[in-house]
Image (cartoon, helix red, strand yellow):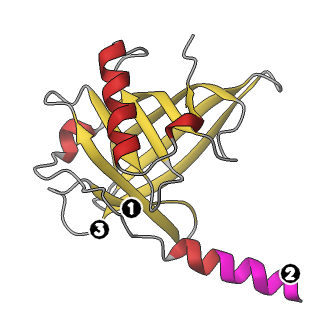
Amino acid sequence: MIKKFAIVVALLVISGCHSVPEGVTPVAGFDKDRYLGKWYEIARLDHSFERGMNKVTAEYSLQEDGGIKVVNRGFKADEQAWSEAVGRAYFVDNDSVGHLEVSFFGQFFSSYVVFDLGKDYEYAFVSGYNTNYLWLLSRTPTVSDALLARFLRQAEEKGFDTEEVILSVQN
């Protein structure tokens, strides 16, 4: 009984995670239509739902209800198999601010915060509701050393543990 209660409490906590980490500000002037399409994961903080994955991509498309369909895909080398998760995202305030709530599990949503974005939407720095979640996404499978260094510098300044960042393998 206690185990079931703990699971329910954990799910309620996760479902309420629409916050933004201290020091992180979602980008303003966000254009959802320009954000749609395929993104390659360049770097991330490790977490259970991507552990051991390479060739990770995220693809965003419009849904009929005005939300955004999210398809995350990655290759699990130890299983020699692709893994895919399909979810949905909605803007927390309005679609000109890079703060969305995303769900892959029913009614349980969590923050997706775009805190830096290339002028031509060629890269995005993304966090979750706290500093345990961090991604560098790009429209191409690789980025310059300068962009990666900028990402790590900004992340460290905002309180992310950059010593734990994993560089994704795309080939």
Q: Amino acid at mark 2?
A: Lys
**Above-or-below relation of 24 to 40:** below
25 over 53 or under it: above or below: below
The residue that mark 2 highlights is 3
Disc 2 to disc 3, how far (Cα)?
A: 32 Å
Residue annotated with mark 3: 92
Three-letter residue code for mark 1: Pro
The location of residue 16, given as percent across then percent down, is 48, 77
What kind of element bears circle 2? helix
Q: Main secondary structure of the magenta part?
A: helix
**Circle 3 residues within 10 Å: few <14, some 14–19, many ≥20:** some
Q: Which mark is residue 169?
A: none
Tag nearer the camera, 2 or 1: 1
The residue carrying mark 1 is 21
Between 108 and 19, the residue placed more toward the observer is 19
N-terminal of the pair, mark 3 or mark 1, is 1
Q: Is residue 72 left or right of residue 7?
A: left
Q: Tell me the element at label 1.
A: loop
**x and y percent of residue 43 in the render?**
49, 30
Res 139 quadrant in image: top left
Which one is earlier in the sequence, the residue at label 2 or at label 1? 2
Whether residue 99 is in magenta: the answer is no
Judge whether residue 109 can be spotted in this image.
yes
Magenta stretch: give its range. 2-10
> From the viewer's perspective, is the residue at label 3 or at label 1 nearer?
1
* 4 magenta-colored: yes
Query: Marks 2 and 3: CB-CB under 8 Å?
Result: no
